[in-house]
Amino acid sequence: MHLLTLKEDYLTKKGALHTAKEISGQPELWSDTAALFYSASEAIENFLRNAYAEADNIILTGAGTSAFIGLSLHGAFFRNTKIITTPIATTDIVSHPQDYFHANQTSLIISFARSGNSPESCAVLELADKFSKKCFHFIITCDKEGALAQYQSNNPSYIFVLPDGANDKSLAMTGSYSSMLLTGLLIAYINDKEKCKQQIDIISKAAQKIFNCYLPLLQQIAEKSFKRAVFLGSGALYGTATEAALKLQELTDGKVICKTDSYLGLRHGPKAVINEETLVIYFFSNDEYANRYEQDLVDAMNDGNNAMYCLGVSESDKLIENTDAQISFGTDAQKLMEDFLPVCSVLVGQLLGFYKSLQLGLMPDAPSVNGAISRVVQGVNIYPVEANKSIINF
């Protein structure tokens, strides 16, 4: 049996079997996640109806990879709810809770976590309960036994636990990330179930196209001697670029240093990092307006230092000039909504990290040689803080 073009016994020997299974199993996991979500849709709709009626704002939160989900979702939530939505990492909230919660305001806090056992996960919910006028907790996690799934609050809460397959065994989050991201989209588009079901079918076909057509290309790229990588994305794909950068950096144990930026943002100084040892990955939007800015940046990349190699990732099969190769995962008959692009686009970052990890002689399932990073973050102390609950009248 082969997974990602590699024999299963080879993957076992190299400490890569779990990661290979978790990357390749995502289309099936997306289907299972949606089925589970819609089986509980009545209760979810009731919870959200009450939350939206009272919430002054929506906070999308998580730590590390889980925090990046919000970077891809906040636009969809704002457009669909008309409620100001902000992605804020738990790691930011814990140290400065007064910057995000207020005694005059009610927040809907949507938390994402694979295990839910990172110290910051429950700490943020406790801080929200302490600092806010009121809050609604929507918890999305992959581990029914995790601390987050067991969290008890006096405020209204809803806990959605993903299928067992979403609880990755590997250090690096892959299926857990994309399935929690999909869950967030199902929430944002909860009033349009049929459209979501169509989109899930399209992203599954897109994923299969990547697996069927582009694995040799990604293996060839991983063989190149790049020491830096820059991932670019705009809109919802900025979150994808951020997560893809972390995947490559995690899976190579920091031997490849990665950076993320937007297409317009790269011009304002960060472009200086690109040199002849740099791999550049462009995640392209399928929105015509946004894509004009993206293509302008690609066309301007020859000004200054040239990258070692540039890869374009897009739904469209239209030739992208000034790239060395492109991955086009779209289908002829169906087009993805821009908000759903991140779910399948991130596979490219996962696969690059997986193949580069093997090329460097590391074990993708546990790439951290000296234990600098672990599956669940350790050693974070949570300190007590007092909240001023007095209401301020303006």
Image (cartoon, rainbow, N blue to C red):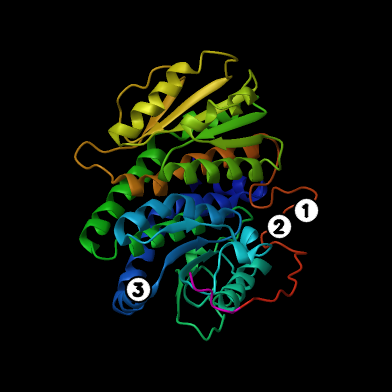
Q: Are marks 2 and 3 in contact (CB under 8 Å)?
A: no
Q: Earlier in the sequence, mark 3 or mark 1?
A: 3
- Was residue 179 drawn as part of the magenta stretch in this picture? no
Q: Few, some or many C-alpha atoms within 10 Å of disc 3 (few <14, some 14-19, many ≥20)? A: some
Write the residue at 28% across / 32% down. 288
Residue corresponding to mark 1: 371
Q: Position of residue 222 (x, y in %)?
A: 58, 31
Amino acid under label 2? Ser
Which type of secondary structure does the marked residue at label 3 adopt?
helix
Residue corresponding to mark 2: 374
Q: Position of residue 113 (x, y in %)?
A: 55, 64
Residue corresponding to mark 3: 48
User: Relative to residue 90, is residue 324 depicted above or below?
Assistant: above
Which type of secondary structure does the marked residue at label 2 adopt?
loop
Amino acid under label 3? Leu
Which type of secondary structure does the marked residue at label 1 adopt?
loop
Q: Earlier in the sequence, mark 2 or mark 3?
A: 3
Residue bounds of the magenta highlight: 389-394
Q: Position of residue 89 (x, y in %)?
A: 58, 58
